[in-house]
Amino acid sequence: MVRVIYRWRVEEGRREEFIRWWHEGTLRIRAHHSGALGSTLCEPTAAGDHLVGIARWETLDDLTLFWQKPGGADFPAAVMESAEILEEVHHLTEED
Protein backbone atom coordinates (compact mmCIF):
# COMPACT_ATOMS: atom_id res chain seq x y z
CA MET A 1 0.00 0.00 0.00
CA VAL A 2 1.06 3.56 -0.62
CA ARG A 3 -0.06 6.85 0.86
CA VAL A 4 0.20 10.24 -0.76
CA ILE A 5 0.24 13.37 1.37
CA TYR A 6 -0.99 16.42 -0.51
CA ARG A 7 -0.75 19.94 0.90
CA TRP A 8 -2.94 22.70 -0.58
CA ARG A 9 -2.97 26.42 0.16
CA VAL A 10 -6.59 27.55 -0.16
CA GLU A 11 -7.71 31.12 -0.76
CA GLU A 12 -9.43 32.83 2.16
CA GLY A 13 -13.18 32.34 2.10
CA ARG A 14 -13.03 29.30 -0.22
CA ARG A 15 -12.36 26.56 2.36
CA GLU A 16 -15.89 25.06 2.41
CA GLU A 17 -16.05 25.08 -1.39
CA PHE A 18 -12.67 23.33 -1.53
CA ILE A 19 -13.88 20.67 0.92
CA ARG A 20 -16.89 19.92 -1.32
CA TRP A 21 -14.59 19.77 -4.39
CA TRP A 22 -12.22 17.38 -2.57
CA HIS A 23 -15.13 15.19 -1.34
CA GLU A 24 -16.71 14.83 -4.80
CA GLY A 25 -13.33 14.25 -6.44
CA THR A 26 -12.35 11.58 -3.94
CA LEU A 27 -15.61 9.69 -4.50
CA ARG A 28 -15.13 9.92 -8.29
CA ILE A 29 -11.51 8.74 -8.12
CA ARG A 30 -12.40 5.83 -5.83
CA ALA A 31 -15.22 4.75 -8.15
CA HIS A 32 -13.32 5.00 -11.43
CA HIS A 33 -9.63 4.29 -10.77
CA SER A 34 -8.34 0.84 -9.97
CA GLY A 35 -6.45 0.69 -6.69
CA ALA A 36 -7.85 3.95 -5.29
CA LEU A 37 -8.81 3.38 -1.66
CA GLY A 38 -9.94 6.89 -0.73
CA SER A 39 -8.53 9.86 1.08
CA THR A 40 -8.72 11.74 4.36
CA LEU A 41 -8.77 15.54 4.48
CA CYS A 42 -7.12 17.18 7.49
CA GLU A 43 -6.56 20.68 8.75
CA PRO A 44 -3.36 21.59 10.60
CA THR A 45 -4.07 22.55 14.22
CA ALA A 46 -2.20 25.84 13.79
CA ALA A 47 -4.37 28.48 12.14
CA GLY A 48 -3.59 28.91 8.49
CA ASP A 49 -4.73 28.57 4.93
CA HIS A 50 -3.66 24.97 4.33
CA LEU A 51 -5.54 21.70 4.05
CA VAL A 52 -3.82 18.32 3.87
CA GLY A 53 -5.13 15.26 2.04
CA ILE A 54 -3.83 11.77 2.75
CA ALA A 55 -4.76 9.36 -0.04
CA ARG A 56 -4.32 5.60 0.02
CA TRP A 57 -3.58 3.44 -3.02
CA GLU A 58 -3.13 -0.31 -3.35
CA THR A 59 0.09 0.01 -5.39
CA LEU A 60 2.47 2.61 -6.72
CA ASP A 61 1.58 1.39 -10.23
CA ASP A 62 -2.11 2.23 -9.57
CA LEU A 63 -1.12 5.72 -8.44
CA THR A 64 1.16 6.22 -11.44
CA LEU A 65 -1.62 5.22 -13.85
CA PHE A 66 -3.99 7.66 -12.15
CA TRP A 67 -1.49 10.53 -12.39
CA GLN A 68 -1.12 9.89 -16.13
CA LYS A 69 -4.86 10.57 -16.68
CA PRO A 70 -6.40 11.95 -13.49
CA GLY A 71 -9.46 13.55 -15.12
CA GLY A 72 -11.57 16.02 -13.22
CA ALA A 73 -10.69 19.67 -12.79
CA ASP A 74 -8.30 21.61 -10.61
CA PHE A 75 -9.73 23.83 -7.90
CA PRO A 76 -8.93 27.37 -9.10
CA ALA A 77 -8.74 28.89 -5.61
CA ALA A 78 -6.11 26.47 -4.29
CA VAL A 79 -2.48 25.72 -5.02
CA MET A 80 -1.12 22.24 -4.40
CA GLU A 81 2.19 22.99 -2.73
CA SER A 82 3.44 19.43 -2.35
CA ALA A 83 2.71 15.76 -2.85
CA GLU A 84 4.76 13.16 -1.02
CA ILE A 85 4.51 9.42 -1.71
CA LEU A 86 5.04 7.06 1.21
CA GLU A 87 5.17 3.27 1.22
CA GLU A 88 3.18 1.75 4.08
CA VAL A 89 5.42 -0.30 6.33
CA HIS A 90 2.91 -1.24 9.01
CA HIS A 91 -0.78 -0.26 9.25
CA LEU A 92 -2.65 -0.45 12.56
CA THR A 93 -5.39 2.19 12.26
CA GLU A 94 -9.05 1.19 12.45
CA GLU A 95 -11.07 1.90 9.33
CA ASP A 96 -14.74 2.87 9.12
Image: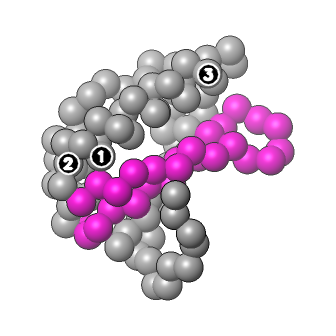
Gap between marks 1 and 2, in whole Å? Answer: 6 Å
Label 2 environment density (alpha carbons within 10 Å; few <14, some 14–19, many ≥20): some
Q: Residue 10 placed where, x, y %?
A: 60, 27
Residue 80 visible to the viewer: yes
- Foreground mark, 1 or 3? 1
Numbered badge on residue 30: 1
Range covered by the magenta-colored residues: 35-60
Q: Residue 73 placed where, x, y %?
A: 31, 25
- Amino acid identity at mark 3: Glu
Q: Which residue is drawn at 45% across and 19% down?
A: 76
Residue that carries the numbered disc 3 in the rendered image: 16
Position above or below: 81 against 25: below
- Amino acid identity at mark 1: Arg
For residue 29, what is the image quadrant? top left
Label 1 sits on a secondary structure element that is helix
Numbered badge on residue 33: 2
The answer to the question of whether label 1 and label 2 lie on touching residues, with beta carbons closer than 8 A, is yes
For residue 65, what is the image quadrant? bottom left
- Left or right, residue 61 beside residue 4: left
Label 3 environment density (alpha carbons within 10 Å; few <14, some 14–19, many ≥20): few
